[in-house]
Image (tube, coloured by chain):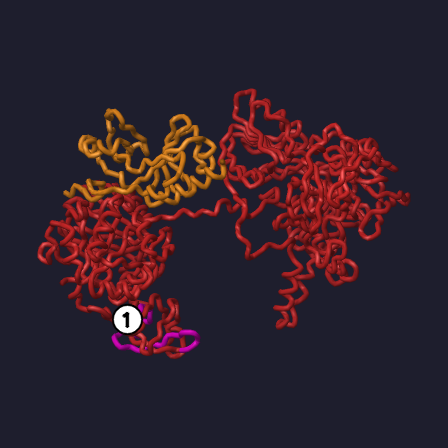
Chain colours: A red, B orange
Amino acid sequence: MHGSAGGAGAVLTRLDPQPRERIDRSAELTFSYRGKPVTAFDGDTIGSALYASGVRVFSRSFKYHRRRGLLCCSGACPNCMMTVDGVPNVRVCAEPARAGAVVHPQNVLGSIDRDLLSIVDRIGRPFTPVGFYYRTMIRPRRLWPTYERFLRNVAGLGRIDRHGVRTTRYDTEHRRVDVLVVGGGASGLRAAREAAAGGERVLLVDENPCAAPADGFDVVAPARALGIYEGGLVPVAAGTLLLRVRARRIVIATGAVEQPLVFPGNDLVGVMLPDGARRLVEDFALAPGDRAVVLAADDRALAVADVLRRAGVDVVASIDLRTDEPAKIEAAGRRGRLHGVTIDGAHHDCDLLVAAGTPQPAYSLLAQAGARVEYDTSRGVFCPTDLPPGIEAAGRVTGALGEVAPTRASHGGGFVCICEDVATKDLERALAEGFDSIELAKRYTTVTMGPCQGRLCHLSSIRLYARLQGAAEAAIGTTTARPPWAPVELGLLAGRSHEPAKRTALHARHEQAGAEIVWTGAWKRAHSYGDAAAEVRAVHEAAGVIDVSTLGKLLVTGPDAAAFLERLYPNRFADLKPGRVRYGVLSTDAGRIMDDGTVARLGEEQYYVTTTSTGSDSVHGWFEWWNASWGMDVEVVNLTGAVAAVNVAGPNARDLLAQATSADVSREALPYLAAREATVADVPCLILRIGFVGELGYELHFASPHAEHLWDTLVGLGATPFGLEAQRILRLEKQHIIVGQDTDSESNVLDAQMPWIVKFDKDDFVGKWALEHARARGPRELLVGFEMLDGVVPPEGSQVVRGGRPGGRVTSARWSERLERGIGLAWVPPEHAREDAELEIRVDGRLEHARVRLQPFYDPDGSQLRT
Amino acid sequence: MSELAFISPGAAPLVSPLARTLAGAAGIGDLSLLGKLEVRNADPGVLPDGASLIRISPERVLVLCPEGERAALKDVLPGFVVDLTAALAGIRVEGEPLLRRLTDLDLDRLPAAGKVAGVPALVTRDGERFDIFFAQEYGASVVELVRDVQEGLA
C-alpha cells in the first residue's frame, strides 16, 4: 500500500497514486529544513513535503508555546507558520516547495522540539491570564526598560532582518473587468462561465493553485482577494504581484470555512479539520494517521471518513454531530501529540482526530462590501444578506451548506482561538471583568485578532459569549470585517520601491560635475559641488551660476491679468510697468504667508510669476481656483517644466553675460528689477535682473531643451556652478527669507517684517481682512536676523531663551565665511526685535550668546545688487 | 505683448529630457520633441497632415505636430495658443500588459488623463501602441520605472 521515495536524509512515505493528486512523482526537488535536506515532489507544498519526511510538530503556539501540527492544510490557520528564505510567518502548508528554499521553525527559544518558552504553558499559566500585560510589569517603573526588552523579545511572531535589503521584486497591476469572481469552486466556476458566455470580460481568482481550466475567462491562481474597497476595487495578492482589480460586478464564491470544535486538547498535534485531512490524502498522497476518529456536522466533512479508509487509515469511530452530538469531548496526548479521545466517557485510542462543527460561510468580503450578516439559529452560523448593488454571492458562502445543524459552543472547554491561545476560561474571565461586548472582548482577549483573522474562532467566540451571557447569538452580533481578509506581505502592499522624482533639464550636468544631489520636496537638486564655501567665494568675488529651474513659473495673461494679481496679492501690481519686476508674497485667506516669488510684467496684459520650488503646484492650483471663482478674463499657464532657469550672480556677472549675448545688458539698459527678452548663446531668454543671493545677478529663463547648451556656455565663460548650500549662505547674509523654512502656517507678512508688501489702501485682496486684524492686534513675534557672538552656529530649530524661558526659535543658521561668524534668522517676541538686543540660544544644552541684527549682514544698502 | 519666444525651443542645440535615460532602452520611443500646442477656448479646426489632437477638456485641446511644423501651426491656430513642446515629455510603448502595470486608467477608454508611473499623464492608444505625455521634469523617473516594469515582464 505504502510506497516510499527517499532522498538525501529525508523519509518520504506516500500512498499509492491518488486520482487527483497534485504531485509529479517523476520530478524531485530538495530544500532544507533546520539545515537538513528534505526531498519533495514537484507539486508538493513545503508543508506536505515536511509531513512526508516525518515532521509532525510544525510550530509553537503564540503565547504558551504549545506544540502545533497541521490543521487545515489550506493556509488559513497559524499552525504551520515558518520562516522561509528569511520571510517570517509563511504558511508552509500552502507554500509551494521550491528547490533550494531554506526553511526554519520560528517563535521558539531553543528548538522546535525543546522550546524553553514552553515553560509558560507548564508553570506560567496562573501568572499570564488574559490581559495580564495590562496589569503587570508596571511597577517598579524603573524596571520598565527591562520589562520592555523582555516583552519585545517574546511578543510577535517571527523575526525580520532589520538590516536586510529588498531582494524581492514586487509589482502592481491594474485590471478592469466586467465581472470578478472570487473563488474557483463549483459555484465560482459556474458564475464565471455564465458571465463569459454572456460576453462579459471575466476574471476568476482562486487560492488553489490548481484552479479548473478557464473557459472563456481569465484565471489568476493561486491568488487571494484581500478586501473590497470603495468603487469595487479588489486588491488581489498573487505571489509577488498585487492585482488591483476594478469590476462592474463582483461575485463572491468563497465557500465556507470549517470550524474547529472547542474541547480540552483540541490543539494537540493530530487534531485536524476534515478538509485538511482530505487534502493530505487526495492532493499529496499522504496518510494523516494510522487510527482515526471523525466528528463532523455535515455530509461533506463526514465523507472524509471514507477518504481515510481508502487511504488505509483505521477509522475507529465516525460520529455525526447532527444526530449524536456528545456533551463532552476530551483529547489526550503525550508531548503534545494526540494519543486518544474520550467522547462522553467512551475512550478511543487514536493518533488522528478529525473534528469540525458546522462550517461557517466565508462572508468577510461580502461584509466589507456592505452586506448585512445575520445569525441563522437553525444552522448555527452567520449568513450574509442584503447584498449591496454590484455584489453577488454564489454557493456555500450564501449559507447553502446542505443539511446542517448547530453544534454546541463548547464540549468541555478548550482553546477558542488557537492563533492567540485564547481559551474558554479567558473569555469567561473577560466577561467577569465587564467586557460584555464582543468588540471589547476581542480587544481585551485578542480573540479573532491573530493570523487567521477570525476564520476559525469568530463563530465559536460569539457562540460562547452568547452561552455565557444567556443571550442569543444575534444579540451578541459580529465583529467588524476589515481588510486584509488574507495575510499579505507588507512588501506587496508597499509595491515597487519607486518614488517619482522631478529632475531639472540640467540634472545630468550636476551629476557629471560631482554634485551631491538631495531631495527638496519632489525635486532632486544639487546641494553642492564639493566645497560650498568656495562656491560662496566665487559668487562674492567673481561669478557663479546656479540651476533654479525648480522655481514655479506661471504665465498670467488676459485683459484682467493686472486686476487678477491685484486681488491675489497684498502687493500692488497694476502699476508695475512692462519690463519691470517686483517681489511678491501670497497670503492665504487667513493672512498667512503662502508663497513668495517675483512677478515680471511682460506686457500690458501679461505677467510672468515665479513661485518657490515646492510651491508651484499649489500656487498654480490657487490661481486656477480663484480664476474660476472670480470668472475674470485671464488665462493661467503653468510653465514650470517648460522653462529652465539659471541665476548668474557675482560682480563679474554682467561682463560674463555680455560675452554670451549681443543684447545691451548695461546698468542703464538693464537696471535692477528689469525684465527683458533677449537671445543668449542663441537661446531666446527672458532675463530678470534680480538678486536672491545678494550680488549683481541675472536670472535667465528659457526653453528647457536648451538648458545644457546654455549652462555649458556660461560655465565655459567662467561662471562657477554653485549649489543649494551656497545659495542658503548667500541669501542668509542678505536676510532673505525662504518660505516654509523661515515661515510656518502661522506667519504673516507683517510679523515677517515686510509691512511694505501690504497695500491696505487697495479695495480688497485675499487675506486683507485677516491682515487688518493682525495689524490692529499687533505682532506676537517677529522675524529678525541674529549673529552669534562666540563662533557657534546653532542648529536650525534651536530655542531662543530670554530670562531662562523659551522666547523664540531659530529658523535658519549658517557660518558666514565672509562675516566670520554664525548668522541666522529667528522668531522672537516683539520687545526683543530691536537692533543689538541680546539673545541666548540653547545649543547642546548650553546657552550661547547672540545679538539681533535688523539689517542685512552683507551689503545692507543693496549697492551690490544695483551696481 | 511678449511673443514668449523664451518658452519655445529654438535653433540652438536641443536635448530631449529623456535622452540619457532612454540610452540603450528597447521598445520605448521618445516623443519629447514632438510639437505640442495647447489651444484654449476654440476649436482648432482642420489640422494639416501629420498633426493630431487630444481633447483635454471641453475648452482645451492639445495639438500634436511634427517639430518642424510647430511654429507655422502656432500662427494659424485659433483661440489662446500656448507652446507646451518643452513642458511635456512623451514616450511611445507597446502592449497592454505593460500599461496595466503603469496605470489604473481604463485602457479601453483612451485617450484619458490620469496617473502613469505615479505621475500625472495623458495617454492615447492606437491598437497596442500607447503614447504617454507627462511633465518633462518627471521624464527620467517615468522612463526608469517603465524600464523596470519591462524587465519584470520579460
Give coordinates of residue A502: x percent, y percent.
36, 48
Q: Residues within 10 Å of mark 1 (few under 14, many from 20)?
A: few
Image-based side of A826 in relation to A210, left or right: left
In the foreground, A423 or A700: A700
The residue most toward the right is A346
Q: Secondary structure at mark 1?
A: loop
Instruction: Name the residue located 79 percent from the left edge and 44 percent from the top edge.
Output: A271
Image quarter of the C terminus of chain A: bottom left
Q: Which residues are magenta?
A: A823-846
Please determine whether, in this image, residue B69 is positioned above or below residue A656: above
In the foreground, A421 or A727: A727
In the foreground, B32 or A237: B32
Query: Which chain letter goes with mark 1?
Result: A
Instruction: Name the residue located 30 percent from the left edge and 76 percent from the top edge.
Output: A851
The residue most toward the left is A668
In the foreground, A44 or A425: A44
Please determine whether, in this image, residue A793 is positioned above or below residue A558: below
The residue identified by callout 1 is A817
Instruction: Name the residue located 22 percent from the left edge and 63 percent from the top edge.
Output: A694
> Is A832 contained in the magenta span?
yes
Image-based side of A3 in relation to A219, left or right: right
Image-based side of A84 in relation to B59, left or right: right
Task: Work out whether residue A283 can be spotted.
Answer: yes
Give coordinates of residue A713: x percent, y percent.
21, 51
Give coordinates of residue A638: x percent, y percent.
28, 44
